[in-house]
Amino acid sequence: MDRPAAGSSYQRFPRVRIRELKDDYAKFELRDTDASIANALRRVMIAEVPTVAIDLVEIEVNSSVLNDEFIAHRLGLIPLTSAAAMQMRFSRDCDACDGDGSCEYCSVEFNLSARATDSDQTLEVTSNDLRSADPKVCPVDQARAYQLALSGNDYDPNAERGILIVKLRRGQELRLRAIARKGIGKDHAKWSPAATVTFMYEPDILINEELMDTLTFDEKRSWVESSPTKVFDLSANGKVTVCDAEAYTYDDEVIKKAEAMGKPGLVEINAKEDSFIFTVETTGAITAYELIMNAITVLRQKLDAIGLQDDDGDLGELGAHLGGP
Amino acid sequence: MDTAAKSASPAGADYAALKELFRPHVESFDSFLDVGLDEMLRGIRPMEIKDPNSSAILKITLEKGQVLPPMRDGRLGVPLYPQECRQARTTYHGEFKVDVCLQCNEDGAQIRHTFNFGHLPIMLMSKLCHLRDADPHKLVFHGEEATEMGGYFICGGMERLIRILILQKRNYPMGLVRGSFVKRGAGYTDKAVVIRCVHSDQSSVTIKLYYLQNGSARLGFWLGGREFLLPVGIVLKALIDTSDREIFTSLTCCYSDKYGRGKGVVSTQLIGERAQIILDEVRDLSLLTHMQCLVHIGKYFRSVMEGFEHYDYETVAKAVLKDYIFVHLENNHDKFNLLIFMLQKLYALVDQTASPDNADALQFQEALLPGHLITIFLKDRLQDWLRKSKRLIIEEATKNKSFDLNNALEVRKFLTKHTTFVGRAIESMIKIGKVNSQSGLDLPQRDGMTIHAERLNFHRYISHFRSVHRGSAFAKMRTTSVRKLLPESWGFLCPVHTPDGEPCGLLNHMTSTCRISSVYNSEGVVKDFGKIKKSLSFELVRVGMNPVLPKIERTGPPEVLHVHLDGCILGTIASARIEEAVNYLRMLKLLAHSGIPEDLEVGYVPLSLGGAYPGLYLFTNPARFVRPVKSLFGLPDGKQSIELIGPFEQAFMEIRCPDGGDGGRKEKFPATHEEIHPTAILSVVANLTPWSDHNQSPRNMYQCQMAKQTMGFCGQALKFRTDVKAFHLQTPQTPIVRTATYGKYCMDEFPSGTNAIVAVLAYTGYDMEDAMILNKSAVDRGMFRGHIYQTECIDLSKKNRENVPEIFAKSVLSRDTSTAIDSDGLPRLGQTVHPNEQYYSVYNRLTGAIRPVRLKGTEPAFIDYVAVNGASSKGDFQKANIRLRRVRNPIIGDKFSSRHGQKGVCSQLWPDIDMPFSANTGMRPDLIINPHAFPSRMTIAMLLESMAAKAGSLHGKFMDATPFASSVKKEGKDPRKPDSIVDELGPMLASYGFNYHGTETLYSGFFGTEMDCAIFIGPVYYQRLRHMVSDKFQVRTTGRIDQITRQPIGGRKHGGGIRFGEMERDALLAHGSSYLLHDRLHSCSDYHIADVCSFCGSLLTATVIKSDTQKKAKREMLGLPTVRPQKNFACQACKTSKGMETVAMPYVFRYLAAELAAMNIKLELRLSNKSELPPSQGS
């Protein structure tokens, strides 16, 4: 790739159009940029947007059937509401504490105490039993239950059962103190706020109408049906139209079918190089909107860091890579 | 958590199929308790002791034995449960008592006394086990698996089982050709007829009938460590009072010249001459009468027959005939008839009118069962006890003249001396697997009779109980013919499930449907073999058998066929009626109340031209392999029914596969039976491989190996278990794609892997050569996480030699709470212990010293469980089990495999964001393998599994992957429906918008661009194998060195290095990398600076003359490095220090010089100080 001549700029002005936005789901279009930006955004959303998750567990009593590490691991994977994570400090950078967790800037303390006492029924210890020291940071289903209770519409406290941690038999007990810290998904998957982040290139489907007209109705139907996803539509009068271009999975089935039918070039499908459709699902730790915005913030911070280094004239390895001074 | 799961599963019936697999073991031990014990005691000849002082004879008879259920020591009536034995490392055993009758002289009073013969180990789930027929709740209550199947013993806390060995089929005369027979002596040939006769107490004597070059035969058997060979004529005459003419006609009756060499003719006219030779041989010895023969035998054997020193020749001879010749028969007429038959078979073998039998074929083999082994070994030990007691009593009687055999109390004193050895011998046999007996007990081997029932995972555990070993003697043989997979094993031994490598073909596994016949019928009632014999003979006579008695002129094949029942000739049936008789017998087998056992083996060997020797051989004995097949005979009620067949009869039966084809047998041989399902030829483990019929066969073998090495759920009672090492997978899953066997054997109780999303592509280069990339995030979330549990059993009462009492205790002075040791000297539960940290401490009562014990190894461990076993009299704890838990999360170098023999090593934990992703689902694979894993290995089933699991997960259902499903006729099957599995799976995928062939378009995780080709991706059940780098890595920079050579030591355990051997050295030499070579072989090894005297060239004469101690001390005080002072060495030989030089050399060189000096060889070094290379002179 040519480097831009001095002074000229490849700057583009990407546009984002949000199609659908729910608490834990978002679908948006990203246009006028290229794959590197889209993929960077995806990667940052998965691995570098900070959240809070349980990182240290001190087990006082554990007479359950699961061993300590197993329970600690399960606790770590419980998504905690992390809206405040961007403002928190990483505990390694925190100068207000010595890393033992008793610090309001970098950690949140949790307590869990459960003991199965009555009857033969097993007691299910869930994320609802975790008591947070900071109301802002709590297991996501607790937060949801709280919100539902606030909104007041027929909230049933038993419906929210929380995330199961362990089941206790009569006489068994679990008591522990846990400390949640800020972290990123790169370090451990438990800090990743994204359940799924993916994007697709917007397909550009061109049907060769002339060639299409040479097909019989049955041929058209079998061609339309050759796509495993519903991309094309065949109307009663034998007209083939693109009904849902984005359903196309780039599996080339229709192109292969057309070739098999002896009609190569029946359809031409190209991926638009500068147009992406993102699908974002979160674990609930932060909302999809926050995820996207935080990702952009993180991405910008990273670019700023490069920019700063550039100012110092010290690009380091990156500079050498770019063939810099 | 597990209690909830357990209460959900219905009790009992669920695990019936699983229990069935262990039945041969449990049933045989039951038969030992129910039948074998009494039968065995009856088989022990009463010991007679003659008083050397008087003529009194003491007769010791063993009468009735009794084994009691395991009880706790000390307290009466408190049952001992297996779990307690495992914990306390004791033996699960019950008392063994025998009523012994003492009688002095014939007319003396019979004095009965019950002797305690120590303890016999009790098999779990046998009739004496407290957990027999316990429901899962009770089992769990007693700390067992809900599925506990038993079949093993607990000896010293170890779970051991008796290995099933292959033996020669009992009571069937086999024609063998073996080179080793020639070595018996002059005139012997390589042909013999061999019969392994088994007494009703399971002890056996093998009789060999050798053919001699002169046409005669010798009968050979082993007695007291050597083989005795008798001319067959003598035995014939000694058996019954008969005439030469009778012997002659009996032998020659099977020949008639009217047949010529037609079908089924086994005799030639030579038989007349041979019969003459046999009779002449006897006459040449001038033995004419029955009595003369008996006396001859008696003379010959009196010195070797123990306990018969004082009897006349006739009695001795009769005892020999009873105890050694055809022990399975009681009647001498039967023995005579069998010997005649064997002679006829031998001559047919010699004349090649009948083919030799193959001793390696399962057709002529049976199993050695645990109960039978214990029966015969116990018999041997009891006989040994009698012998020892006799020796003691006679010694005492000769010493002490006043000793009276009539004094029962005195005698008893001597008898009780060795009683407990009997129980101990059985226990030690099970513990170490060694059968210590003088006679060898006619067993194929003496060691390796038992194996440890490892609970590494469930597959391995089951396989132990289903394994059948050919015998350790064959492992050393250079020929491979014994290892061959023979068609006779079809349906009985799994062709897939045998290890590759050393025990290949010798260690086989029974198929999942294979059973072993026992003394119990299907209702669990002991079979009455006498009654069976009676009703069988009755039925046979009804279909036209001529009974062997009364004696009439008989003929032989092809006119009539001999009918054998368990090695006894019942009579003959005309060959024209034989088929009808066979069919009739088979029908009786199927009828429930015919009095004919359902597992009767109807071995009908038809007439043939030079084939197997014809006859109708019926077997009812236990220890035969049997398997069920569908019978196509219409029963009176019109139902098809299941018939149990054995390997002997199978060779002559027409069994078709239910694929609708005739298997090439055409109309000439119509099928009489049908396989129930083709998977019946596979073992349990082999049956678990999905679609194994689509894999290349070696891959299925590898999978059988690897399934046994997986890290899964070894058991749900892990909490109670004290295995030395146990592997545990934290979050296992049930496979989406599974075979019918999976559900049948409740494999969900013991899962062994995870459904991983596997993408098949060459992505980063880290998946080359069977390496595989794991997704780091998937691992973070818990995929393949595992633990190793290690239990240490510390027994302080045993350890010290000086009998110094040691107990667990912590120093009172130590206020240190940072260590893992609690106040009782044992570790705290849940505590992390790092390597080299103390975790328990021992207090020595005598010295008062506290000895803390440190953790070995390089990994930290968690204290999972601490238990103390029983307090000593003072209430101190001396025995403890400490279970350590080590976390083993997947790391680079750990081994994984799919269920298709595709193993791989994790090469990277790759970041999730860099993994390829699917644009529509956003999924990233958990695992990436290289496409090169497929073309050469042809594991098509793995591809099918991936597709099927994808389709199954989309549709939310488990997929059936039973192999050979297409070979089973389906009633009402749509003929238009596609047969191929892909055509079933493709539409399922397509209906959810996925590619028909299981591929997806993936995008690069690095660039976000579409990959050039579609990627095959889907869930595959992956297993984590127990081989982990943490147990294997070996690396060192510095460390321990060898004392003598000063070279690094070897061995991973001691922190040694990996040997840099000669071949490695050659490689470096070839590369010219001399610096590296010097570094490896010298600097990092035994680098040494030696002082050499340049005058005399000696390495060894250097001595220190003086060391400037003052100066050295001063330097040390100032903290300066001590420099080696120059020239403080002198040569002792030259008495000067002038010529001393320092030379760097390997220390071993100095050692060599010293060794040579010890042999008076001087090693001289010539030192020169040339800096440049020496001028090349000449070449």
Image: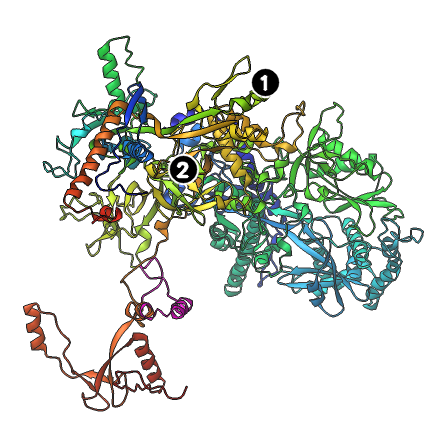
Q: Where is residue A198? Give x, y as percent.
A: 35, 29
Question: Hey, what amino acid is under mark 1?
Answer: Phe
Q: In this view, does B862 lie to the left or right of B130?
A: left
Residue positioned 26% across, 35% down in the render: A10
State the quadrant of the C terminus of chain B: bottom left
- State the image coordinates of residue A196 (x, y, percent, origin top left): 34, 28
> Residue A108 colored magenta?
no
| Label 1 – label 2 distance at C-alpha | 91 Å
Which residue position is annotated with label 2? B76
Report which residue position mark 1 lands on: A217
Q: Which chain is disc 1 placed on?
A: A
Residue that protrudes farthest toward the right in the picture: B258
Residue at figure coordinates x 64%, y 36% from the top left: B678
From this viewpoint, is residue B149 visible?
yes
Return the residue nearer the eye: A13 or B109: A13
Label 2: how many Cα within 10 Å (few below 14, some 14–19, many 20+)? few
Percent position (x, y) of residue B557?
85, 48
Numbered range of the magenta stretch: B1048-1076
